[in-house]
Amino acid sequence: MDTRLDQETALWLRWDKNPLTFESVKQLIAEGNKEELQKCFGARMEFGTAGLRAAMGPGISHMNDLTIIQTTQGFCRYLEKQFSDLKQRGVVISFDARAHPASGGSSKRFARLAATTFISQGIPVYLFSDITPTPFVPYTVSHLKLCAGIMITASHNPKQDNGYKVYWDNGAQIISPHDKGISEAIEENLEPWPQAWDDSIINSSPLLHDPKASISKDYFEDLKKYCFHRSVNRETKVKFVHTSVHGVGHDFVQSAFKAFDFAPPEAVPEQKDPDPEFPTVKYPNPEEGKGVLTLSFALADKTKAKIVLANDPDADRLAVAEKQDSGEWRVFSGNELGALLGWWLFTSWKEKNQDHSALKDTYMLSSTVSSKILRAIALKEGFHFEETLTGFKWMGNRAKQLIDQGKNVLFAFEEAIGYMCCPFVLDKDGVSAAVITAELASFLATKNLSLSQQLKAIYIEYGYHITKASYFICHDQGTVKKLFENLRNYDGKNNYPKTCGKFEISGIRDLTTGYDDSQPDKKAVLPTSKRSQMITFTFANGGVATIRTSGTEPKIKYYSELCAPPGNSDPEQLKRELNELVSAIEEHFFQPQKYNLQPKGE
């Protein structure tokens, strides 16, 4: 065996006090199973801006008791350097319901070990005594003015995965260079501290606080400020079905409905209780569409409910479906729901604020791969729209900057069904989005309108925005690099393509290299990153397409949109044109045969 692997496994056996992971490593060594050992010890999990995300199991490549202790020790030392008042303010830690019996790992166990690390250093910890949605962590950081927050969750990933998500003292997810600083601090603090494994020390510690009751109370009080039509909610005939997809959302969405004076939504019984096995779905991701919603549709048909609200397992995202007159269910895309919620939050704000001078301090945000529908609404209505890089960490941090400048941030969203409807949480929140969607649907019903009809009205008023997104799977980083280098050197003379099939290209922005030909100095305005690939093409026909690599999965994703000016254009014709454009992009830019790419599995 190679010496580095020998060293790593020797340290592991010295430090790991979890009998299950300890024994399985010992056994792999005894069997001489190099392949498995390489998988477990080949490389330490990389701590990025999204924190950690990996499968649970033994070794430095996986989420387990020891890697959680090591990560938290590094994070703790980094925070001590950054905040002189860390011992006065403290941190918040929460967790979802994930568990992996084979390695003895669970979100709750990881959260307790993380709390032990901080408390052993005299740092106060607000540790939730029970599961919460992810947005409760950024809410608690802001609300209690803490230095940082940790959420143990793998969101909508497969059941064997877990994750470690980190928030800074501004209540938003960390951005660079904190990820690098934390990463280095982890490497410097790998050996478990004397009390690291003794999580019983926290039980009687005066430094341990359970924020569960007070934070729940305050969160739902704050949420009530976004209820605009209490009397409509009380009387509404619209019925809702809710699923938490075996995750944490059930109790919290029930409470949110109560806060808005709604009757409780019908919960899908097979999916309402947390279950780390996710037994009724292939992937616990409501983005995957109808497969995850089968049980919801059946319950809705039985109870005559017209609307299905589905949270992902950590309840920071929301999918919405509406029964059409044809009897079919329509699942709204993240962009469509973004249009509906953006329109609703602006309309509701405008009714309360008749003074139009306030518009100049009012903002909405979305990520650069999301629909530009908010830009169209902002242009016509006179408020500000800004786009950020992909991911809520950018929108959360930008929203905080704007709020600190006295601006009013009404809404932010990303196409991956993430919505920030209430800026008291500087991240996506599927609980607030669910109840605000319910109020929107109930209000529209008083005007005899469905969500689908209102969406159409938005498109007619502000211009149709038709979007289409998908991905190819590619496990080989070398191939990914080749594909993108080919786009940067399309003619063999270091030029980007000028056409894609029959479609003429009018603009190119490359956020890997920092090139943007729409800027006078050809330099991109948004931050650039050499670590990920991302190129946006603008087409002469009003189309925009972005091709990028995923931060968390082996995918090359594309996002395309055709924006038409306001007025009654033909959506079917636009759809056909967008489909042609997407086919051209797949054929000429992705070249799946040449690069051996696997298409998205249906």
Image (cartoon, rainbow, N blue to C red):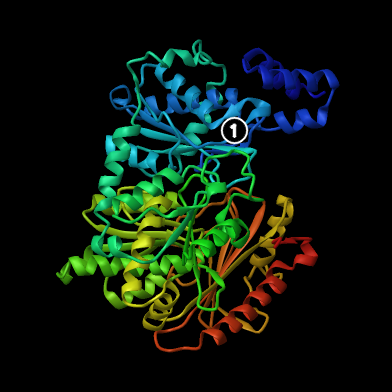
Answer left or right for 261 relative to 392. left
For the C terminus, the image quarter is bottom right
Q: Quadrant of residue 448?
A: bottom left
Q: Is residue 514 visible?
A: yes
Foreground residue, 538 or 586?
A: 586
Residue drawn at x 43%, y 25% is: 76
The correct choice, above or below, for 42 with respect to 397 in the image is above
Q: Position of residue 10 (x, y in %)?
A: 71, 16
Q: Position of residue 373 (x, y in %)?
A: 42, 72
Residue 223 lies, in percent from the top left, at 29, 50
The image quadrant where one finds the N terminus is top right
Q: Position of residue 87 (x, y in %)?
A: 31, 22
Vertical relation: 456 (above or below) 110: below
Mark 1 residue type: Ala
Question: Helix or strand or loop: what does disc 1 sit on?
Answer: strand
Instruction: Residue under label 1, please give it.
Output: 99
